[in-house]
Image: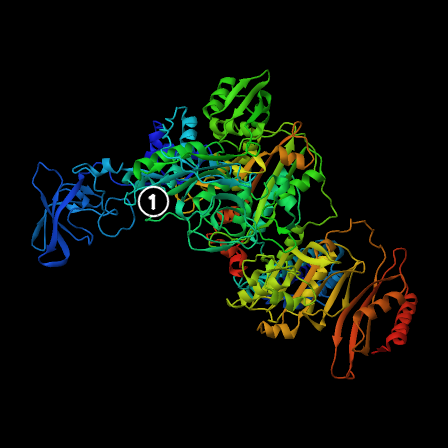
Amino acid sequence: MTEIADASLQYQVEDLVKQTQQAITNARDLSNLEQIRTQVLGKKGQLTELLKMLGTLPAEQRSAAGQWVNIAKQQIQNAIQARTTELNEAQLQEKLATETIDISLPGRRSETGNLHPITRMMQRIEQLFRSAGFTIEEGPEIEDDFHNFEALNFPQNHPARAMHDTFYFPNGLLLRTHTSPVQIRAMHKNKPPLRVITPGRVYRCDSDQTHTPMFHQLEGLVIDEHCTFADLKGLLQDFLNQLFERELSFRFRPSFFPFTEPSGEVDMSCVLCNGQGCRVCKHTGWLEILGCGMVHPNVLKMGGIDPEIYTGFAFGAGIDRLAMLRYGIDDLRKIFENDIRFLEQF
Amino acid sequence: MKFSEKWLRQWVNPPVDSKALAEKLTMAGLEIESLTAIGLGESNIRVGLVINAEKHPDADRLRVCTVSVNPNEPNLTIVCGGANVRTGLKVPVALVGAKLPGLEIKKAKIRGVESFGMICSTTELQLTETSEGIMELPEDAPIGMEIAEYLQLPDTIFDVNLTTNRSDCLSIQGMARETSALFNLNYSALQIQNIAATINDVIPVQVTAAIACPRYLGRIIKGISTTAKTPLWMQEKLQRSGIRSIHPVVDINNYVMLELGQPLHAFDLNSIKGGIQVRMSTPDEKIILLDDQELSLDSSLVISDSEKLLALAGIMGGKSSSVTEATTDIFIESAFFHPDALSPTLRKSPIPSDSAHRFERGVDPELCMQAMARVTELLQAIVGGEIGPIIECVDRNELPKPITIALRRERIARILGITLPDTTVEQILTGLGMQLTPQENGWQVAIPSYRFDLQIEVDLIEELARVYGFNQIPSQLPVKKLHMLPISETLKTANELRNFWMNQGFHEAINYSFVDPKIENLFNPDAKALRLANPISEELSVMRTSLWPGLIQAALFNLNRQQNLVRLFEIGVCFNSVNDQLEQKNRIAGIVFGPVAAEQWSMQSRNYDFYDLKGVIENLFSTLSKTEFSYNQTAHPALHPGRSAAILRKQQLIGFCGELHPKLQQEFGIQSRVYLFELQLDGLTEAELPVYKAPSKFPSIRRDLAFTVAEAISFQQLHDCIQTSGGDTLQSVQLFDVYRGTGIKPGEKSMALSLTFQSSSRTLIDSEIDGAMNNIVGLLKQQYSAALRT
């Protein structure tokens, strides 16, 4: 009887395991699976009931039978675990599938604006000169004759003055025609050695295709005990090479400015055609880009600096023109129209 | 100045081509702006004589000409369309086989008449861009001569753009001096034949303005030919310099001016009453100039006789004393007028004249006599006449003094950064006409009278650099002591502000600093905008007192180009009068209107309003200070009185923000409401340096509060009331709802706030917070009759 009973118990357990495994495999979802678990492994579950029957077995058979039942329990638990993982995974896959969105739809942006190309160019110039230890000075835009002309060695009534097409006010003040007056102010404010740039707005009474009555100028000034024309050449070449991020060719031509002596103009190889000749460089391959020179001793004196001890050089360039060349702007008049379709490109 | 290359090469002939010559001059500071080739080389075009010209039998506009180009050969038959072709005329004839640009001359039948060549116009000879009829050659043109040889062709016209300091080069002589120095060649100076006076006629010359005119030379020439013509060679040279042939005497004066640089003037002697006076004009004296314009003078240097003004000295002659075709007796003037003497007149009335151009920049004070000799020689040769003695008035005290400059060897290296050998220095300066006397540390340099631009040592150093070649001077990077530049962490730069506004979606605008007074007045009716004396136009005639006029115009510009969303900002100087003192201060301003965001598939579209703009401004302020900024309801002439705020920092007014006044909105024709702000830049430069405070370790507690109050009570008032009554554990007050409508009495609004309490030293208990809330509710009720909603 006991052997039969024993064999029958083993048979029943194995049968239950088989049936349960099948049911687990068929379980459609987690609640279904939980139902199966309760039916088999719950307090009143089928396996639990079988386990209760162990007490009826003879003592010598109990331990072996206990092992079968525990193995069976383990097998069923494993099957549930495996099926749970499967169902979880399937559920996740389904969730992922239903939640898929069109990632090509445009995002919710807070739009950004743009800096004016002149500002952009000005900031770049400032960064370059700052990196070389220059400070930035500013001065008033309504100036007096002394700072704009007299202190810069412009003789009274000289044609060089007339060429500046100055805007005047009835009281004799004027709109600065160049940023050079800031040189004088910088010399009065600081003791040499000096390394400053003075970018800013300047005005000339001139308006046509190639002139706007207001434009932007960069002025630079270096004063030191040993400051030569060779230094001037080196610095300006370095500046333009860095500004345009390429190795340019240069030529220096003598010129005339009342406030520098010697005075020169700098031509660089055309950045649009690489010196091959194009409309912008008037087919010469060269662009006139900077005016420069050694600070005139009279100007140093006006700035309270002894020209026997110190020498200096100064240079000036049109920022609007640099920006036009750098960004390919072909019409000067666009610069001050503030057309958003223009501005948003920078 | 334009000049013929051939002419220059008659003085000095460097062994280089036109292009290289131009390059050399340009690189020495005499910028050759353009080279224009004219004329053809040897091309079988010859001087011919029209022996007979008669109408073509089958064409009204054509003539059949018999032309001789060689007396020893048969005459040629040439059909010509030039209206001016006539018997006896000398003309350029392109023979069969001659090659003109794009045209080879062949034997041809023209309307049935065989033609053996072409009579040429100046255009066909590549001399001018346009022409009328065929070119007429002088009677003495030698028959058969190659036109290229006869007209000194081909030639190149150099257009030199001289800097204002180099007026010494405003002549062939000057260009020759410079060219010879650059190529280290000698130039052939002009050999002038001094012609002795043949008559004793003089007129009195009185110079009362000796400072303005330290030297005045005059001479009478009587009985000149009224039929003489300007020789072709002279006409050609004038033409190549852009000067029209007018009258032989005038042409000769112009020629000598071009040749030597001395402007000259000829008066009709018979129009001069009494004698010549060189003086300053008296107020309201009038003169009609050669170009027919009448000038009313105040204090100008003039030439007059005892009755009337004869000329505006050095600028232009008067009409009444000018030389005409009937003139037989002339008075020639060769004078030195000081540059400063002419400029006041020229500033007042700019008169373009070759003479003024030269005198204003400076003419060699020692040139008058040479020029007088040269003009006499040419007049004698071309128009003849009896020559009177030279009348000279000179005040040597007022003439520029000869200049000697000390040049130190060490200083050359100090300025240029290179050491030039003594021989180079001496060669360059000597080549430029200077005389050098060696000294221990350099040289004493005597400057020729025509180089009055050279005044000090560094001027000579420039000459050395210029002739040595700027491009021969090496480049080197300046050396400097290494040290940090001060960078403030709490001072905000304009660029940081720009970046802020850019990141908020604003485009940066740059407007002119001068604006339309009408628009300026709409924005700032009380400000007295500074007016330019010489504006470009009325629309750009006053200095802006605010950035708004420029921004509104930029906004309109965009609106007219289908941009319905406009967000612009600008940083720039505004010009205001503060206590009668001009104040030039940078401001930052912006304009915005249209949809808050571009139309988007997942968001509701709405237009900008006051709080959108205020939010951005608050963002900006939060980067500067947590406590210093405040807003006051305010009235501004350009803003909606109920929707505008004055902005204060530490109780100081720094700007405004708000909605454009509906009146102005209508005036500008803008559909949507427009929002503006403007702030003083110096109110935004200082930021606070962060000071760390540890966050509380204890939990915070939130309580919400909703109450109704009268519409007129501002949030700020309620906020302040809550802050003062909430005790020191009240950390923040957030407004999360404002409601009007059902359940709320008209004229009232409901406000819901969340209050956060927290202590840094302990966990707060409910009873403490209940106490604080009671205080708050009590004070709100007491001060603003706020009724708690439950």
| Up/down of B492 relative to B777, above or below | above
Residue matched to label 1: B328
Which quarter of the figure has residue B547? Answer: bottom right
Residue B546, percent from left and from top: 66, 61
| Up/down of B611 relative to B28, above or below | below
Question: Looking at the image, can residue B631 be seen?
Answer: yes
Residue B721, percent from left and from top: 86, 69
For the N terminus of chain A, give its image quadrant: bottom right
Which quarter of the figure has residue A313? Answer: top right
Q: Amino acid at mark 1?
A: Thr
| Up/down of B301 relative to B675, above or below | above
Nearest to the observer: residue B316 or residue B309? B309
Viewed as shown, does residue A341 lie left or right of B384?
Answer: right
| Up/down of B182 relative to B766, above or below | above
Tell me which colouring the rendered structure shows: rainbow
Viewed as shown, does residue A143 lie left or right of A53?
Answer: left
Label 1: chain letter: B
Nearest to the observer: residue B440 or residue B214? B214
Nearest to the observer: residue B75 or residue A207? B75
Count of number-bearing discs:
1
Question: Looking at the image, can residue A43 be seen?
Answer: no
Viewed as shown, does residue A119 lie left or right of B627?
Answer: left
Residue B104, percent from left and from top: 16, 44
Q: Secondary structure at mark 1?
A: loop
Nearest to the observer: residue B727 or residue B695? B727
Residue B440, percent from left and from top: 59, 15
**Which residue of the protein is positioned furthest toward the top in this rendering?**
B440
Q: Residues within 10 Å of mark 1 (few under 14, many from 20)?
A: some
